[in-house]
Image (tube, rainbow, N blue to C red):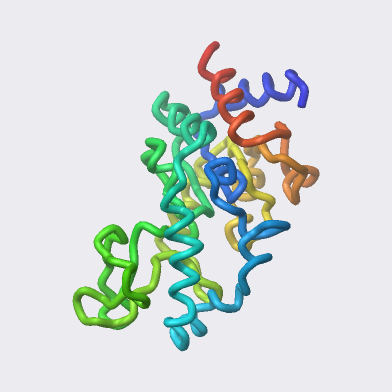
Amino acid sequence: MSNHALENAALALRNARCAMAFTGAGISVESGVPPFRGPGGVWAKYDPDKFEKGYFKRHPEEVWPLLKEIFYDTLGRARPNPAHLALAELEGAGMLAGIVTQNIDSLHQDAGSRTVHEYHGSTRRMQCLSCRAFFDTGAISLDILPPPCPSCGGLLKPDFVFFGEGIPSDVHAAATDLAKQADVCLIIGTGGQVMPACRIPHIVKNRGGVLIEINLHDTAYTYNATDYFLQGRAGDMTPKLVRAVLER
């Protein structure tokens, strides 16, 4: 990556009327959260068909131990890394309007970010599939699996998007609205493979906005849409960019 690209990206962010960030699994890898795709990813180890909503409803006693292992034991130990903290700092300085994240780990909120649209939901809540009530995950014991609903004894499901489920309409609307307002989008740790989330940066681009991409390797965005590609680890490049923006 050239200093020229970093300087131009910092200038675009400094001059933005409304900047947003769009994040994926790559921003959380340095926090110890495994990615889902690729070598060493969750779907290389576990069968993704087990996480289809219909399968879960039919076989909750088989799926819940997997959910606990992947999403609660592992994610429960994760802490924000310098990339999450840098985005929170940028928002705190009034230079980032919000984040659309595909991640369900809540690390952006843990880092101090306030406007976070969780496109695929979150591990922080569960919903009962019978009485439809929501519960904070911290209030639910996972000593018994599947955990029963505290209200009706029904089946609890983590409040993130399973295969075969649609994106919640309110989250999709909020993410799309932010993208329509933004004239700069910072893409971090995502390759643009997951539909329909991957369309969000294109909304910014199609309205004449600037895309700044931070990824280890080139992606579906790099040659088709990205204006400034800052190649490297999210935990290195994001703080470097934010420092360049704020220290002028």
In the displayed structure, would residue 191 be above or below residue 151?
A: above
Name which quarter of the figure residue 38 lies in.
Answer: bottom right
Whole-percent x, y for residue 208 in the image = 65, 39
Left of 191 or right of it: where is 185? left
In the displayed structure, would residue 184 be above or below residue 69?
A: above
In the displayed structure, would residue 87 be above or below residue 76?
A: above
- Please tell me which residue lies in front, 138 or 204: 138
Residue sticking out furthest to the front: 143
Residue sticking out furthest to the left: 151
Residue at the spot x=70%, y=34% of the render? 232
Residue at the spot x=36%, y=57% of the render? 124
Instruction: Kindly tell me whether residue 193 is visible in this rendering.
Output: no
Residue sticking out furthest to the top: 248
Name which quarter of the figure residue 193 lies in.
Answer: bottom right
Residue at the spot x=21%, y=74% of the render? 150
Whole-percent x, y for residue 127 in the image = 33, 71
Whole-percent x, y for residue 129 in the image = 34, 79
- Please tell me which residue lies in front, 141 or 16: 141
Name which quarter of the figure residue 4 lies in.
Answer: top right
Instruction: Kindly tell me whether residue 109 is visible in this rendering.
Output: yes
